[in-house]
Amino acid sequence: MSEMALPRSIALVGNPNCGKTALFNRLTGSRQKVANYAGVTVERKEGVLNLPSGRRVRVLDLPGAYSLNATSPDEAVTRDVCLGRHPDETLPDLLLCVADATNLRLHLRFVLELRRLGRPMILALNMADAARKRGIRIDIAALQTELGFPVVETIAIQRDGAQDLLARLDGQLPAVPPAPEADLDVHAETRRLIAHAVTMPAPTSPRDAAIDRWVLHPVVGVLILIAVMVLMFQAVFSWATPFQDAINAAVGWLTGVVSSLLPEGMLRGLLTDGIIAGVGSVLVFLPQIIILFFFILVLEESGYLPRAAFLLDRLMTSSGLSGRAFIPLLSSFACAIPGIMATRSIPDPRDRLLTILVAPMMTCSARWPVYTLLVSAFVPDRRIGFLGLQGLVMFALVIGGIAGALAVSLISRFLGRKLAEHALLLEIPAWRLPNWRDVLIGLRERAVIFLRRAGTLILALSVLLWVLSTFPTPPADWTRPAIDYSFAGRIGHALAILFSPIGFNWQICVALIPGLAAREAAVAGLASVYAVSAASEDATAAALGQALSTQWSLATAMALLAWYIFAPQCLATIAVVRRESGSLKTTILATLLLAGMAYCASFFAYHITLALS
Amino acid sequence: MNTYHFFELAVVGLIVAASTLFSLRQTMPKAAARVGELARRGGMPDRLASFFFGAPKAADCGCGQCSGCGPAQSSQTITLHRSKSCH
């Protein structure tokens, strides 16, 4: 390759959790998800870098890898792109190796391996500020001379933290580094380079070691984990109330305005009973979603989550799940889809399949509106000591999903699935104060996703449900409620035959249908059905909660909660299971498994509650 | 039936039609594409068929990371190999 050439495509490559995606975001202005643990990026991502000279360069963010000897599907993506074997990618002009400056002992090995490829390279020593704070001194000039290609320091989370790198990228392609000896021992070479160019006071930070002594303690650590989770669910309930009241009031006000402006008729019915009732009943849960993700993002940024994975590894492996399943399962708390995709970091196909099967049982954010609606309506707002009962019930529901996942994996283990030999080798990152910019970006993204969903899919489904609940209109000599004559009423009554053994009434059966497109649409569905049935114009979520608490039995509410712990009610999730597993049989198995578990759990919840009450 | 009733009927009809199309495209992109193909064969101009039945830019799966159910990222499917019995 000519030395005078200018790079047109760059691939960011390096060990997991060295800040590749943060640097990618900094260079391209993207907003890809970043977190302080390995395995966040499992697929290549593309962006465009506008260099100071005005040139545009294509930038690829590759999944983290420890070696070119890929052991998992995500590492295979990186290997294939670097070697020019990827079917959809050309060989990048420049490899931008990113290494964590605080952990060069590990990261330099992969850099040395990449040097063997004989491609133009630049090494970005990321987190240079953290290294300096720890007293790590890196002789950049010496390292550059030894490696044979340019080395720059970067701080991906700072606005001007990539200036040196940008200047380098704006120039010509660096020369191809000299080929190392064929039998070079990368471990010995790493040690030599560190001895030559790096001064390190201590391998780990004393502060981190002191915190980890407690956080990773087998007993105290688990207690801390439980306390963190309980605090999170308590906060979700108690902090959100004033904001929810404000949204409820706004929805009520809007309903009043529309009702007073329009004469009674089809259009007013569509706007108040369909759109405002449906979308408003979901919108009201926005504060809770934001508070929940605030906690999740802070935990992600701080570096706590891999430590939690370490604590739970024994529990997970003893139940038959791979320790590597922790991160995918954790991602599933936002949405099962990224969770299922994150299973690409699991090398063993059987482990990966099992994780895909159980990932939808984690409490995704779309379940929150359903849980919160029912918990608020049926669980008294009482305190047990300093803990709220509603928060504790939410915690129990989340634990219910986790217990279900562990039970399935345990059963699969008893059915003869051998445990894979891939033990969990987890890189524990340094503790970090959350980067508030990333937290705010994350919160904004979650809010936008939630609002976009409410304003598009939920709105469309609410309109369709209103049509189904309103037409056909009742005959002249009608005696029953008007909605009974509608399509929705008829469908609901027909489905109720199947669902009555688990305590579901026909209104729930109707709401389950839009819930197939998006779980929280079930809340919008209930709101529309009850708004169409009700004489009152009050279409707020509070009014829906009140209607449910007076018209449903506690047993029915418990049955619906149990249903939602396991229900495979999300077409997008099923589609991703199909895509990732590549097997229709697996997809059907997963759907039937989850549906069967949901039905059984609801059956027991309904009948046990009936017996107890 | 007065003018307001006509107006009401037209607005409700439009909202319902748009919602139906949107829901179809978001939740069943392949089915929507098939309908689009049928519409093209029936004489609907290409541009209109793509507008009404084309694949969504991103489906509303809620995560923002999956490219929706529309154009798939390169999937990495699972291949299970039967373990060979030892003799």
Image: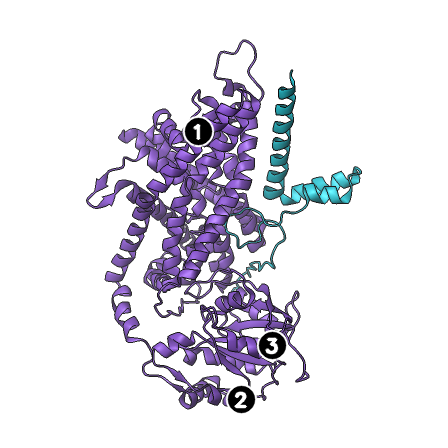
Q: Give the cyan chain's letter.
A: B
For marks 2 and 3 on the same chain, the one whose residue lies earlier in the sequence: 3
Query: What number is the disc on residue A539?
Result: 1
Look at the numbered disc 1 and give the secondary structure of its residue. loop
Would you say residue A517 is visible in this rendering? no
Q: Percent from the top left, x then y, of residue A236?
A: 34, 46
> Would you name the residue on which mark 2 appears?
A183
Look at the numbered disc 3 and give the secondary structure of its residue. helix
**Chain A painted colour:** purple
Q: Nearer the viewer, mark 2 or mark 1?
A: 1
In the image, taking residue A86 as reference, residue A500 lies left or right, namely left
Cα distance, mark 2 to mark 3?
A: 35 Å
What residue is shown at x 54% (from left), y 9% (from top)?
A477
How many callouts does the rendering have?
Answer: 3
> Would you name the residue on which mark 3 appears?
A170
Which amino acid does the dot numbered 2 rest on?
A: Asp
